[in-house]
Amino acid sequence: MKSVKIAATAFIALALILVLLTAGCTQSASPSGGAGNASPASSSSAPNGTVGILETSGVGPMPSLLATGQVDGYIAWQPVVEAGVESNIGQVAVYSKDLPPTGEWSNHPQNVFVVRKDFYAQNPDFVNDFSALNLAATQYINDHPQESAGIVADWLAGKQNFTYGNVSVSSVTVVSNALPTIEFTNDPSDSWKSSTSDFVQALIDIGSVNGFVKNSSDRDAVLYNFQPYQNAEAIIAAKNVTTPTPLQNTVNVGYLMAVDHSALFVAVKDWQYFNDTYGIALKPEDLTAAKPAVADFLVNGQKVATVNLVPANAGPNLMQLAATNSLQMSYVGVPPAISAIDIGTPITIAYPIDNLGSGLVVTKGAPAQDWQSFAAWAKQRSDAGQPLVIAAPGRGSIQDVMLRYALQNSGFAVTDVKV
Amino acid sequence: MTRRLGLVLPILLIIGWEIAAIIVNNPFYLPKLETVIPVLLSPFSDILGTGSLVDNALVSIERVVLGFALAAAVAIPLGIGMGRFAVLNDFFDVTLELFRPVPPLAWVPLALAWFKIGIVSIVFIIFIGAIFPILLNTVDGVRGVKNTWIEVGTTLGAGERQILTKVILPGAAPTIWTGLRVGFGISWMCVVAAEILPGPTSGLGYLIMYAYNLGQINVIIAGIIVIGLIGLAIDQGFKAVEKRWFGWRGLER
């Protein structure tokens, strides 16, 4: 009898909690109710008003934030741009290449391959051969987009569906749509270099870079060493690779779970192709794993080194690991690489991994199909005293910097949304 | 009867969850049971390419056991020393109290720099989480051994070694065991913190963080439930031992 009483009391208490919870949820889901507290337009001197930027840690929470009305849009890297579209949460207002100022970002840098200087000095052949594999993998992605999409979806999600709310979308579809928005290239062309310098300047302007890079008279020498790229090109052209002396120590290579780093994923997953075609391969030790953690680096069929593939949540983490020699090489976004070099991390940028590939996603049905209509919408919302709130994946990230520049260039004041 | 009563609230919570999910009708706040149950019901099938729930749980348990065993191996001898000898206590106390409030997560950047990527960093984070409750309970247990017992032992001619092994250790054992129980609970909590370190590609904590980066809420909830269930099972084990071996504590006066 007593237990029945207790159970009844528990049930009533639970019901109360539920009512409160439900009330709280439905309230904050009402349109623009939870959109932070960006300052109203009246407090700004900018002609078109204000837009708030909410810095989230990474891109993971963005689709949820948009779906629950806590932000009006987000700027992210792939696959999160296409995932928002495929799951019917949002629509792409503008891809990063079309952000203003006009032409400024039409070929903007996105990710690079960095190498610790001491590691390159001690193992030049290994780094060159590894770079040749990267070049070959980039070629593979461009020649075989369908196979690549399958491989990348397998690495990121075991080819399973992504579930966003009630919608399940195929990871293969998401990745297939994402790949064409990214330009995979390893060529450190003049336009790439000039775009990267713009980026350095942008980072200096927002105060993220104020050390070695800013103070150097020859920034190129501080940032780059394209020797591995040039040597890799020569190896590919000659169709002949010399086997380096096997390395004593395991090599740790960092990467992110992003479509941008597809070169690594295809190189490992289709290792047999690269082994047969180029005589260079990263053969996973566990051939069945969706995301292998250890691979053998093979040159002409001979094992040269054991390579640990180290994933992290964000670029700055990878750079911290490189600083303590926990990583010898890494795939990473341009801003973390520049910032790391700026504070004295002994790494060098060896070549690009990809360009472009970020996108501004806004609420489904919002009156924003391109930058102009987005700007008009932002002005209207600012005038109405409810400035737009856009999520960005962290201060100083490439997406954050491009969005701030674009907004300022279009006559908006940017406020940081504090939560 | 008490066991069955304990099941009432979990069942109510599950019913309440489903009702709330229907009322809220927004899976981003609260996904319905139906999206989570399939994940739990197929514990041997792969999730997002990270391996199965069972694989990941085994990896996490292995890491926790390593970190916990190391913490116990350090904390119990140190705790006995500190409980028995005031000079040791005075020497260590301030330093330990300085480090105790630091959350294990705060050590992550240093752990990576010192121990590099891999199992050692993970074990270190779990070690930090587990050591303090074991240590404090051991000190407390040793101090709580009745003076009359020690005096009786001394009167009967026991040396320091015998006092330690025959009187203090058995006398303090129930409290030490409580420390181990609490310590294991905290180790298990630290597993998520430890497995967000770069490097691991397996473990329940990794699975949750990986699902978070892809915004997969149903996988996150499934992971939370499995962590909870394993924690519960292990705690029941600790309790069973407590009842079997240390039941005398409730009887002595």
Image (cartoon, helix red, strand yellow):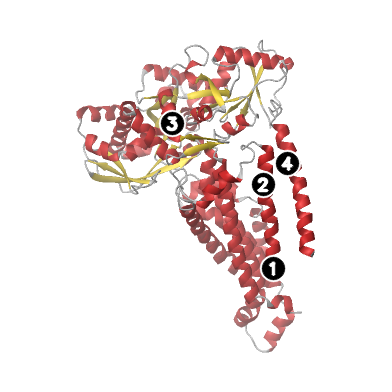
Pointer 3 and pointer 1 on the same chain: no
Q: Is residue A403 left or right of residue A284?
A: right
Label 1 to label 2: alpha-carbon separation: 41 Å
Q: Nearer the viewer, mark 3 or mark 1?
A: 3
Residue bearing mark 3: A173
| Quarter of image, res A55 | top right
Label 3 to label 1: alpha-carbon separation: 60 Å
Q: Nearer the viewer, mark 2 or mark 4?
A: 2
Image coordinates of residue B198 in percent, x first then y, are 48, 44
Q: Are marks 3 and 2 in contact (CB under 8 Å)?
A: no
Q: Which mark is residue A116?
A: none
Q: Residues within 10 Å of mark 1 (few under 14, many from 20)?
A: some
Image coordinates of residue A256 in percent, x first then y, are 45, 37
Residue bearing mark 4: A21
Label 2 to label 4: alpha-carbon separation: 11 Å
* N-term-proximal mark, 1 vs 2: 2
Residue bearing mark 2: B17
Q: Nearer the viewer, mark 1 or mark 4?
A: 4
Q: Which mark is residue B140?
A: 1
Nearest the eye: A321 or B188: B188
Position of the C terminus of chain B, as image quadrant, is: bottom right
Q: Residues within 10 Å of mark 3 (few under 14, many from 20)?
A: some
Q: Can you say whether B127 is above or below A399 in the image?
A: below
Pointer 3 and pointer 2 on the same chain: no
Label 3 to label 2: alpha-carbon separation: 32 Å
Q: Can you say whether A366 is above or below A318 in the image?
A: above
Nearest the eye: A47 or B39: B39
Q: Find numbered disc 3 in the image and state the secondary structure of the residue it sits on.
A: helix
Label 1 to label 4: alpha-carbon separation: 41 Å
